[in-house]
Image (tube, grey):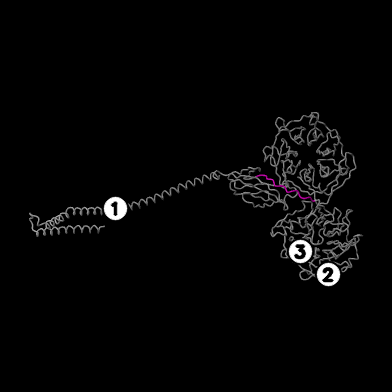
Amino acid sequence: MVKVSFLQKILFVYCTLFLFSVTASYPQQWDITEKETVFVRTDWNNSNGLPVNTVFRTAQDQNDFIWMATEEGLVRFDGRSFKNFNHSNHPNIQTPTFNDLTASQTGGVFAANSNALVHASFNKLEVYNSPRELGPVRFTSITETSSGEVYLGTQNGLLFLFHESEFKEVYRPESMKIGYIRELEDFGDHLLLGGINGLFSFDKNSGKFHEYDLLSGKDVKAIQITPDLDVYIGTRLHGLYLHKDGFVTKMEFPKEKDLGEISALEYSSVDKSMWVGTTSQGIFKIRGEELIAYPDLSKNLNEVWNIFEDNKEALWTSGLGIGISRFSQSTLEILGEKSGLSHGVILATLEDSKKGLWLGTPGGGLNRVTSNGVQHFTTKEGLSHDLILSLAQRGNELFIGTGNGLNRIDLNTLKIDNDFFGKLNFEEEVIYSLLKDSKNNIWVGTNNGTLSKLALDGTLKTIELKNELLDAEVIFGMEDSNGLLWFGTFGNGFFSINKQEEVHHYPIYDIAPSQMVTGILEDTEGDLWISTPDGLILHSNGQIRIFGKKNGFQFDGIFKMIPDDDGLLWMSGNHGIQNTSMAQLMELKKSKDDNHRIAFTLFDKSDGLKNNEFNGGFHPAGWKLSSGKMVFPSMEGAVIVNPKKIKEQNPLASPYLESLNFENQEMLISNGIHVPAGVNFFNISYGNIEFDKPNSIRYAYRIKELGSQWIDNENRTKAYFTGLNPGKYEFQVRAEQFGVFSEITSVNFTIDAYYYQTIWFKILIILFVFIMGFGVRTLIINKRLKVELQQKIKSQTNDLHAKNESLMMALAHLEKHNKLLEDVAWTQSHQFRGPLSKILGMVEVLKNYDNYKKIEKTKAEILKEIEMSSIELDQILRKLNLKLEEHEAER
């Protein structure tokens, strides 16, 4: 097959349900049909998480969790992980076998195991064991009434009422042998009981039982009540019965579809029909007079034990030893061989002006699909080859590029023009692409590396391609708003041709090593988006940039781009179909951040595709229909996307928080969680409820107190922490799917501290250290002051000693001085005064010598006396002067 490496990956099941309302007229003429399932199937068993392969009953609670009653416990499921509640992790549960369950009006589910009633809500469990005074009982069925009362049936036919946390045995006449109660259903003022001995009703007001004679002795395995209060009763060996307007009648089916062994029933709110599960023939649907079989739905499904339709209209089935399966409704349509196409692989696509859808195949020729059916065009009808790679319409002519030249079909007659093939020189050439321009020229690209223009008058001109475009295989063409033609090649980038037919080449090997261009799209600003196997290239103002997974794309390799009427751009590739809004694409164009991310939605097998691989490398590899739908060719049929039908995705639910785990201990999440002191490593587990694409959800978390940066945890559902200091924290987690973020879920927790890690202890330590420091400082200061004082005292003592010595010396000098003074005084008073007085007396005598009568000495003698006294006085003065000089020298 040509360009197999670029065939895209996505597929859907094309199938429509015809279901009609049930009537009360039996027997009736059944319209037996067989439909390909419209559901996407996902299976779980004990090899991929389900604890056990046998599931007895399924229900969904108000939080959207799916609960399963199994022989190995009560199981909660979020689409990705199973949580099992049994005797090993909840000691109050004495036996692991749960036989039945029902959704509770107050949230969660009520479940019945062999000897207890259990109310489960998220990760909280309340277990009510049957009291001993009731004797040995085995609960086998359960229902909750509209008034909130819970009834339980048992293996031996007893009926119990559980109300206000107490069990009460309901009276029943001994003559009425109900036996094993498999089914309990609330029916207004009555309860319906089904078991091995038939169908019974219990009047809740009078306490009386009633037996339905038509079902007496018949093993009733399923009861289902419709909103119109019609009651369907399935039996193990006697088929299906209907209770309507107070009467019970048996529903008769054709022998070839004799539904004798009914094991499960489920009312479908989608189309007001009834699902019917059997023990050996699979699953059917009843609506009106139509009985629909689903071979694909019933494949590998043994005895059906339970059927359940969830709030997203998905179907859950379980059976004997096969686990559980979910069938979600596909939003896509598939046209394949089962739809009448000549081949399962589709290549080129085109819708003609008469609303006929043309589909080219790699060996089955050409198909035209209308509301009247499928018409085939092959070599038998005159095509030159059954490999169809390209299509184009001009007026009432359809041009077909084949593995052997160019063909033409008249759209009025739908006849192949056999003469046309021989007129053109395309024999033995593979026609990869066809493009009709605004001037009604048909541009033809071939495997021989030529590009030709077929004019309206039938003339053919080959465009001269030079240099790197020599022998380039043209696989795509488009005309922009300015009339400029653009072409993509298989290995030479892309090029343009202007009105003068001048060629301008754009190699892209620097950013797209494949050099292959599969599509070109012009945006509202006149810039070009070029699809390649390496990513999406933006050509703007002569500059090129490439975008891919780092920018939020679900895959890099893009084959075909089709914008819808609501502003979304759809892109096919090897991994399915992805879409984003043109507004976000324009944001990406204007962003200067090469890692700027935008939101994408991916459609793959989980949405109904049989194969994720789409096809590209020829033209046109996709088409927007006049109805607004889009068709993409894939490896398993033509995939039809109806944007109007594909509703906007439900808002991504916020993650739920499960538990905080450390050292093999699990602490259920609640505000006020305390992590014991000394725990340095722990994790917080969380999840999200998503059944269609659970593995596509990514998570990011953070500790608010540690910063605003989110930690990308990819699709892991545990956040690990180590080395957090004691204190209070807030854990936050958010989910992201296809670029859309959920609301933040958070929980507060506290890491406890040892006494020596508490703030008070630290304060005391700081205070102690402060006091000790203050004491040491004081001691050091005192010691220093003491030393300084001692040094000061010593210095002052030395000074005092020196001063004392100086004083002593001064005193000594003073004493000497005083003594000198004393000597002077004494000399003056004693030695000095005597001679002086004598001299003065003698002088007086001499002065008055003549007046004295009795003077015995002569004047000479007196003068001698005066002389001698003067000499004596002089000696005294000399001695005194010498002492004074000596004293002065000592100083």
Relative to 553, 402 lies left or right = right
Residue type, label 1: Leu
Q: Residue 329 carries which label?
A: none
Residue type, label 3: Met
Mark 3 / mark 2, whichever is N-terminal: 2
Q: Nearer the viewer, residue 514 or 183?
A: 514
Residue 16: in magenta span: no
Q: Read off the residue under disc 3.
A: 516
Percent coordinates x, y for residue 225 in the rendering: 82, 38
> For the residues carrying marks 2 and 1, which lies nearer the camera in this image?
1
Residue 654: in magenta span: yes
Q: Read off the residue under disc 2.
A: 462
Percent coordinates x, y for residue 372 in the rendering: 89, 53
Q: Are the residues flagged by discs 2 and 1 in contact, CB closer than 8 Å?
A: no
Element assignment for label 2:
strand
Q: Are the residues flagged by discs 3 and 2 in contact, CB closer than 8 Å?
A: no
Residue type, label 2: Thr
